[in-house]
Image (spheres, rainbow, N blue to C red):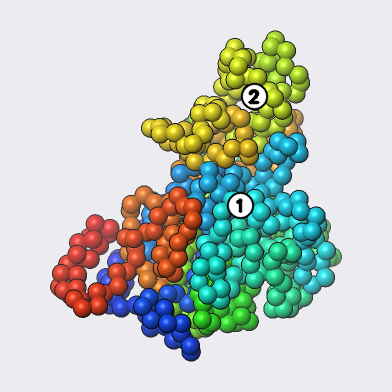
Amino acid sequence: MFRLANSIKQRTITALLLLAMAIPFSPPAVAQSTPPAASKSFAKPKLVVLLVVDQMRGDYVDKFLGQWTGGLKRLVEEGAWFRDAAYPYAATETCVGHATISTGAFPATHGMVANAWWDRKEQKMVTCTADPDPSVKNIGYAGATPKGADTAWRMAVPSFAEELKFQTSGGTRIVTFSLKARAAITMAGHKADAATWFDGGAWVTSSPYGTLPFIEEQAKSHPAKADFGKTWSLSLPESAYWYDEKAVGAVPPEGWNLTFPHPLRGKSGVGEPDSSFYEQWASSPYADTALTELAEKAVDALNLGKAAGTDFLAVSYSSVDYVGHEFGPRSREIQDILVRLDKDLGGLFAHLDQKVGRGNYVVALSADHGVVPIPEDMQKTGADAGVLHLPEVQERIEKALEPFNYAKPAVARISGSDIYFAPGVYDKLQQDHAALQAALDAALAQPGVAAIYRADELRDRPATQSPAHRAFANSYFPGRSGDLFILPKPYWLMDGTPIGKQRSYGTGHGVPYNYDQHVPVLLMGFGIQPGQYFQPITPADIAPTFAALCGITLASRDGHALAQALKKPAAPRAPAHPAQAKSVSASALSKNP
Ligand SMILES: [Zn+2]
């Protein structure tokens, strides 16, 4: 506690110093060899950097800040920290969160309603990035031959990066990296100079995106394979860890025990990298480091931030998500991987300072969703917590509809919160009130179910005082979303594991409670006024903030520019009275200790 208090004090002093230095504001000088005439009137960042930490809960910053010394600490101390940022929708999943950050819109607008949903026409599950166009193909670097075809064609609005490239001179380079296709693709948009993800031990992209020589070179050096045989050990003294050595209810990857150290040697512990090794690698800090290296190489190889336009670089760090699913949020593994990520980000920012120049780039860091504690762990507190078995909900609905003569199966699929009926069934149920009520009552009888919403209650985002109702409406996209929606009770994990089988993971996310919705939003660099901000905001505000800094317009947005954290350019003729400006800032700061 002492360390944390001390760090807050230091932070306040640093923030005060920064504020004093920043008033009155003059935009950083931008060196350009042949600046377009328009740029004289309005300075823009040379590089926009978007960092997403998959499954990073908002409270991880509050809890672990005192142990960070690198990039995460710098974002808090030198940047704008929005302490009450949360997704206002129900579908708190990876594809949805990344698309929201990237577009500035909610899923009701951008259409990425889940990582995967039931395609009513095809009568099968489709992933958010699966592209049925036969001319589209995934492409492997370093000779890899990946399966599938992944693009952003299902994302109904352009990304901020696409808009930036289109609306400015076209000189914007768009480069994104993640272990996951649904992150790299949604951050980039429909086309990009490079959108790169990791699949089956190889770095891959797909045909609408470019392939770049520096990625080929990096892929050929096999950074993942090179980590075979390494061991993930605790990086801080044991006394620094908050939680027990063994996380309750954890399900580690094959080949790992419940306790540190975690060796990266695959299933057998000897020989060559196998699929278990790649699972271990993705669940370790080494994968974060590989992504950071790729980002730094992109800056060097493409001279990002050095051309006439504003470039865009995005990295989604996937490993916190894998670790969180396996070990839960109350684990030494989560705490340690964040300590490692903090170091990596410190290195990345130092690299950007050197290559692009401090103050010439703007960074936003956020997360796509949070995570619920492992239910078995939460139950120890005596709180109402448990597992909501989705296949049992399906069984109950089928049984309830038996007396009403519906063809079996009446339910085509339950995927997360979304219940999809077989073709024609929901239309019929809407005219058949007794049968619909029987189905709703059956679902409500399942342990852990708090409420069921119907699609017709969610269309066109009706005004409502209920946060859960509004959250489902913000997630609802006609045609893709389900017919009915399950709201679990708080701390009840929705689980799709078939009846009679063991759950193969520790915990998850995807519901409209604050543990899944609350994420960090940190902004730093060009045009950003440092400080702590307590106004409730959403991650959909990031893209409009970038748009404001770059002087472009987003077509369809649900977010708003975070004006409170933007530096106000000094008026050209009547500069702000320094004393007045200082007193305003000091009082603003005192509200946010
Ligand atoms: Zn995620």
Q: Is mark 2 within 8 Å of ligand 1?
A: no
Q: Please state, as top left, top right, bottom left or bottom right, where the C terminus lies in the image.
A: bottom left
* Residue 462 vs residue 327, the one in the foreground: 462
User: Residues under labels 1 and 2: Cα distance?
Assistant: 26 Å
Can you give x and y, in whole percent of width and height, for residue 332 in the image? Answer: 55, 55
Dot 1: element = loop
Q: Which residue is mark 2?
A: 426
**In terms of image quadrants, where is residue 570?**
bottom left
Can you give x and y, in whole percent of width and height, for residue 396 in the image? Answer: 67, 20
Residue in the image at 58% along x and 14% along y = 433
Q: Is residue 258 visible?
A: no
Question: Is residue 321 toward the left or the right of residue 220 in the image?
Answer: left
Query: Which residue occupies the extreme top position in the image?
Result: 403
- Three-letter code, disc 1: Met
Q: Which residue is mark 1?
A: 155
Q: Is residue 82 above or below residue 342?
A: above
Residue in the image at 56% along x and 53% along y = 157
The disc placed on residue 566 is none
Residue in the image at 72% along x and 27% along y = 422
Q: First in sequence: mark 1 or mark 2?
A: 1
- Three-letter code, disc 2: Tyr
Can you give x and y, in whole percent of width and height, for residue 450 in the image? Answer: 51, 27
Residue in the image at 42% along x and 82% along y = 37
